[in-house]
Image (spheres, coloured by chain):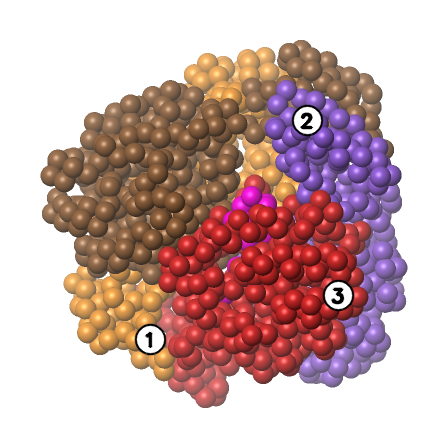
Chain colours: A orange, B brown, C purple, D red
Amino acid sequence: MIIVMKKDATTSQMDRIVSWIKQMGQQAYISQGEERTVIGIIGDTRSLDHTLISQFDGVENMVPIEKPFKLANREFHPQDTVFNVGGVAIGGERVVSIAGPCAVESFDQMLETARSVKEEGAQVLRGGAFKPRTSPYSFQGLGEEGLRILSRVREETGLPVVTEVMQPELVSLVSSYADVLQVGARNMQNFALLHAVGKAQRPVMLKRGMMSTMEELLLAAEYILLHGNPQVILCERGIRTFETYTRNTLDISAIPLLKQLTHLPVMVDPSHATGKRELVEPVSMAAVAAGADGVVIEVHPNPEEALSDGSQSLKPEQFAAMMKNLKPVAEAVGRKL
Amino acid sequence: MIIVMKKDATTSQMDRIVSWIKQMGQQAYISQGEERTVIGIIGDTRSLDHTLISQFDGVENMVPIEKPFKLANREFHPQDTVFNVGGVAIGGERVVSIAGPCAVESFDQMLETARSVKEEGAQVLRGGAFKPRTSPYSFQGLGEEGLRILSRVREETGLPVVTEVMQPELVSLVSSYADVLQVGARNMQNFALLHAVGKAQRPVMLKRGMMSTMEELLLAAEYILLHGNPQVILCERGIRTFETYTRNTLDISAIPLLKQLTHLPVMVDPSHATGKRELVEPVSMAAVAAGADGVVIEVHPNPEEALSDGSQSLKPEQFAAMMKNLKPVAEAVGRKL
Amino acid sequence: MIIVMKKDATTSQMDRIVSWIKQMGQQAYISQGEERTVIGIIGDTRSLDHTLISQFDGVENMVPIEKPFKLANREFHPQDTVFNVGGVAIGGERVVSIAGPCAVESFDQMLETARSVKEEGAQVLRGGAFKPRTSPYSFQGLGEEGLRILSRVREETGLPVVTEVMQPELVSLVSSYADVLQVGARNMQNFALLHAVGKAQRPVMLKRGMMSTMEELLLAAEYILLHGNPQVILCERGIRTFETYTRNTLDISAIPLLKQLTHLPVMVDPSHATGKRELVEPVSMAAVAAGADGVVIEVHPNPEEALSDGSQSLKPEQFAAMMKNLKPVAEAVGRKL
Amino acid sequence: MIIVMKKDATTSQMDRIVSWIKQMGQQAYISQGEERTVIGIIGDTRSLDHTLISQFDGVENMVPIEKPFKLANREFHPQDTVFNVGGVAIGGERVVSIAGPCAVESFDQMLETARSVKEEGAQVLRGGAFKPRTSPYSFQGLGEEGLRILSRVREETGLPVVTEVMQPELVSLVSSYADVLQVGARNMQNFALLHAVGKAQRPVMLKRGMMSTMEELLLAAEYILLHGNPQVILCERGIRTFETYTRNTLDISAIPLLKQLTHLPVMVDPSHATGKRELVEPVSMAAVAAGADGVVIEVHPNPEEALSDGSQSLKPEQFAAMMKNLKPVAEAVGRKL
């Protein structure tokens, strides 16, 4: 870390900082520039609370040099993390296709969707039993009944299931039904929840907050890893910008950049990112071309009757067409679908 | 609500929508434009799940006409909501000054801060016992020990206390110590937490998420109101933008606009919004001039030793100077401090 | 267009608006909802100055129904616009690769780059003679000398040339040397410049402003089309967001969405969007997979000596590798490279 | 400047950089950390093209330590810049109120507005003769006829006039009529225009681009100062964010921060920032409380007939009320209105 001092910082102000750094068990060096003096800290400053330094008199600014995440950092863990979910390798050569409706509505709806997406090559089933909704007047999900439905559909079809958990005290309940626990974008910095899924025995799909930086996403993953759970999937689902023609702006560069920064698998959710059915296929193609390890696609057998987010759901025949078009793209980048 | 149909939408597509609207107990009208047809829904569409409509074939877009929040809406509740916190009127003529350190560190630190800010006119004490921190390696707060300290300091000084609660299952614990429950910016859409504080017997200070629109803030407040708690304070604390000279961008227009849209009290946290000590005073002046019902100010007796967010904490003498300068501004807008 | 009236709007306020609409030669209809009344305008409201309506007393809001651009609108021009630049079809089946350094530095540098990128399949040469630079202390380009170099290199290699023009009064000068006039992101709403290139006899590559919506980009194109120049290439080059790991955030969804909204060719500049050399290839792959008609790539024979933007320039061997990897992606989406 | 090397950077990569730095006439020092090595440059690096360094192999990142603007920097020019516009001191004790319609429509409209705002205390008249408009179908201003009107109204009322100039080649024309040249938000990085107004003999009001950082605003001002014009007014007019209830988000913290960073006067345009008439007064109050040297207010005698931006224009009686309320706020912060 580099500490930039104010132009008029005094020697005694610098001395106080240097002695504090030494007290913290780190080494410091001072570099006198023409206008400013900077103090460098040698050594791993991740465990140092950076905000502690900013309050010293005379400090203008601090510049971190090391990335603040460690367990998620590819520098210390060069090989890709690959793990198994119900027989499906996540993070491996094959691009994983996760499909299903936004919300679980009924056993018949889920079973019909599951059979149809499985036939087209989907390897994992998705569906929300607990739904985070901006308005208290919107449908909030079937709750545990939804979990039971998901579990029964898995038995019928063999597809492993990913579903969202919104509260720490429900992690064990959801874990008893689901194969992968999803932490939604709005909960990416719900630290109690990160702690709880970090203790769980299930892989976690961690969605990037819509106004979270990649660094914050990686630090959220770090919470989960640090609490003992090494199986984390990062999922880019669009960030919030000024553009209004799409619901969010999918950050395509995040895919190759996250793959460089971390060893964890990286997936993309084009349905939530765009909010528009007709953009799901081209954006999925882009995601796979950019190196995504999987795509998460909303599919509903009858989107006109969907209780949630219908406008971005593909119909089964649209999903089938997409999978057909996605295959050559996956192969073009040396992978399978 | 207005439903805009695609240019090539068919009559039968429109008929399906109109008959669905009627089924939902609402009236519809059709208006044929030159290029597009629009379908209007007459009546209160708040309880209608808007996403349900978007999935009908032929729909291009939907435009809500009514604001989606009702209990928080000033249209249905024209007079200001004013309530009492430990003898302090929130939302009344007097601008409320809430002050204290970011995190509770020790009894002595809290007591010293509390006495000093009280002397300068602060009416409520703040301090975090549970701290949401981006990095798992940062100080996470003293937990219940911090709550006990806050409670003892209240006994000593008479200042009511506001502190953050981060998990639904801790709402009753925190309520047993605190006068006001704070829901932090990162938890603004933690719906389980909103539900829990909605059931609590304590006023709630709801901070705007740094990625949240005013409408989302009001819908988050609506969750709390709908679950039975009418005492909600909205708090603007800066939104995330591309600007890097400040930590966040305080949305000053949000103050008068929220005051128009809702009857709830509106406060401002200039310390977190700016992240810079030297901006706290001028931004507080602006907030009061724009009509804020209160300001939330970080004050630390010795910011160089603060365990959290020191760079934005005022020293007691800076707080004293600020209060002195704030007073004439409050009076200039017909209020007291 | 839909005009939403305030809850307490009076009949006479509505009457004034309706009679004004009729005066403007349009038809109006009134729809009374439970809480609000809306006034619809039937007919093409593009030529109506929307802001004129907002000032009427009683108006709460206005909602445009039609897209405000007409000449650029695919609804009125369903077939793709394809045109020829020095023998290269822009907007056709073949994905066009445009390559070259950020700034023209010398004849040797340009010739070396041009030969090397041509060998790898680039069809158009790029290079800036006039450089818009944030700081007045940065290199501002060689000016006309740079244009002469570009022109000589075209003679040597046969590659058509695209270069930026920054001022209306230089359009004819730049046109005399270049095959395609580039309007840079910072000038996307320099309306005098749009007017001038609209009068020019050269195709225009219009880069999306980093602060501009897709609608604003299309309206900027509309300026050029309206002034008589039908040959406009839209270029997505990243928008400004809060993310700091990349320079800008490439809006990948803009590609398929622009292709739906307009008949104009759409290209992508991954070099400026990401600002990082190692992201150029994966993001280019994504762009082609999403349907881009071309990519604009910075290549420099010796990036360490580049006078501008070196960090995002590919070395010739990196460009060669990228072209090799891009080819199967183009074929996977039914195109050629 | 600090250059952060990649973890695996080699000694010879560092040596090349150090020798290049020396070649540029600067001194370098190397600091070896545990994971990374950083190279510091001692001395003023403003004239060094930063992007030149980023292309060296082995460089991960660069961190500027000094602010890149010099002439605009308060560090080198501690006292406030105050200058005279038609008898009005800009940047002095008195907060300057600039008022008038968005666009010049007719002599009568301008004269009526000018007389009315002068009576209420406005010191400068504003009005656009050349209007930058997003859509080519919107009213683009009266052009030189508008300038003549402004000039005649100045003769009648004695109010100095500020008006926008959009093209370098029109600077001398506009200068012959106007007292202050306005550079609009969309042209903040139109460098040819900055150059031209830098050569002009008139003060310049430079509006912050809606997606420009404060640093970019200061660098744009630096262009003008460097070309010889020391009389620059910075004007905050809202930045673009995800919030949709207001047109832009006024960055209130920019006022005190710019006042710290630069000696130039700082004004605020609440009309364009908010886009809503009812927010103009509270936001103006906030701006003055935060330390603004002036406010720019749209006033139209008959906003229902305005040809541009009516929804944010105050009626004369609203302007009168605002000025009455603004006065005590100015006095509360030790200034006059």
Q: Is residue D62 left or right of residue A121?
A: left
Q: Is residue D268 magenta?
A: yes
> Circle 3 sits in a helix, a strand or a loop, which is it?
helix
Residue B274 visible? The answer is no
Q: Is residue B215 magenta?
A: no
* Residue D125 vertical position relative to residue A188 in the rendered view, above or below: below
Quadrant of the image occupied by residue C278: bottom right
Q: Find the magenta span and give its range.
A: D266-281
Residue identifier under label 2: C37
Residue identifier under label 3: D149
Residue type at mark 3: give it.
Ile
Residue identifier under label 1: A7
> Circle 2 sits in a helix, a strand or a loop, which is it?
strand
Quadrant of the image occupied by residue C305: bottom right
Residue type at mark 1: give it.
Lys
Label 1 marks a residue whose chain is A
Tags 3 and 1 touching, CB below 8 Å = no
Q: Nearer the viewer, mark 1 or mark 2?
A: 2
Residue for point 24% across, 28% down: B175
Neighbour class for label 1 at 10 Å: few (<14), some, many (≥20)? some
Label 3 marks a residue whose chain is D
Residue for point 19% across, 36% down: B147
Tags 1 and 2 touching, CB below 8 Å = no
Q: Nearer the viewer, mark 2 or mark 3?
A: 3
Residue type at mark 2: give it.
Thr
Residue for point 47% across, 61% down: D337
Marks 1 and 2, how far apart in space?
60 Å
Image coordinates of residue A294 in percent, x first then y, are 56, 39
* Residue B269 vertical position relative to residue C125 in the rendered view, above or below: above
